[in-house]
Image: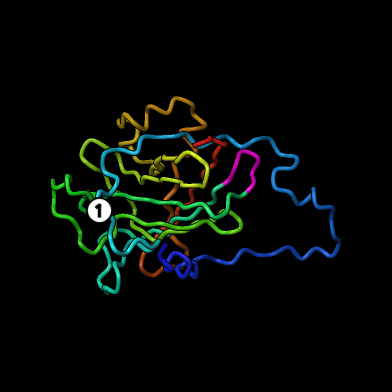
Amino acid sequence: MSSSIHTRRAFLANSATAAAGIALPAFWNTPGAFAEALDLTPRQTEGPFYPDHLPLDTDNDLIIVNDNITPAVGEITHLSGKLLDADDRPLRNALVEIWQVDGNGVYLHTADHHAKRDANFQGFGRFLTGSKGEYYFRTVKPVPYPGRTAHIHFKVKRPGEREFTTQCYVKGNPQNERDGIYRSIREPKARESVTIDFAPLKDSKAGELAAKFDIVLGVTPS
């Protein structure tokens, strides 16, 4: 696995630690100890365009390929979240993969040639979740693909578990309701869980965006 998966962790903001002066029993600090079970993230189709030839650079920064200095075209987005189980416990050391179209609406796939691909967009990335289940990618805000609303594909790989795939969507995008795969999620809460804000990043002079997508998994044997 590329060492850059680990070195790119520098992008992650450090979480603040509690400064309470009284030590509590361990169970008080157990995530989800007294909470209701979280709603599971709906499983969605992988689609036909999972990369059929992975780039040499598969780290979590999709807007810069290898040592190039020219960034990808699009609205730079800091995409982060946590991988959790239904009891709100973090799932560490899980491999999270994402893939999406570039700013021209083209996938990193030899069968997708309806437009010219942005050679400066990596199109695919990986991140190994940390101790709190966190992941982070720097990418671009997704744009529509012919016949599909804007979305990002996710695949989660964990030892001994069946691979999990899903997609996230842009909140407020009017094309969502015309997208058959999005509409196939019948449960309103489940649909809401994969529909996320791409909000302006505070104090960003470059107009960057931030988006958060937490993924909640059940236990599914391989």
Quick check: is 13 in the magenta stretch?
no
| Picture layout, residue 67 above or below residue 169 | below
The residue labelled by disc 1 is 53
Task: Write the residue at 39% across / 42% down.
Answer: 169
Instruction: Identify the amino acid type marked 1.
Output: His
* Foreground pick, 174 / 160: 160
* Disc 1 crowd, CA 10 A, few/some/many (<14, 14-19, 20+): few
Task: Write the residue at 37% across / 32% down.
Answer: 182
* Foreground pick, 123 / 204: 123
Quick check: is 86 in the magenta stretch?
yes
The image shows residue 66 at horizontal and vertical percentages of 30, 70
User: Which image quarter holds the N terminus?
Assistant: bottom left
Question: By what rule are the colours in the image chosen?
Answer: rainbow
Along the horizontal axis of the image, is 194 left or right of 99? right
Q: Kindly indicate the quadrant of the structure image that contains residue 18.
A: bottom right
Task: Write the residue at 44% across / 48% down.
Answer: 197
| Picture layout, residue 45 above or below residue 31 | above
Task: Write the residue at 34% across / 53% down.
Answer: 141
Q: Secondary structure at mark 1?
A: loop
| Picture layout, residue 207 above or below residue 191 | below
The image shows residue 136 at horizontal and vertical percentages of 47, 59
* Foreground pick, 103 / 48: 48
* Foreground pick, 42 / 19: 42
The image shows residue 27 at horizontal and vertical percentages of 79, 48
Q: Kindly indicate the quadrant of the structure image that contains residue 74.
A: bottom left
Q: In the displayed image of the protein, which residue is found farthest to the top?
A: 186
Q: How many marks?
A: 1
Question: What secondary structure do most residues of the magenta stretch adopt?
Answer: loop
Chain part drawn in magenta? 84-89
The image shows residue 7 at horizontal and vertical percentages of 46, 70
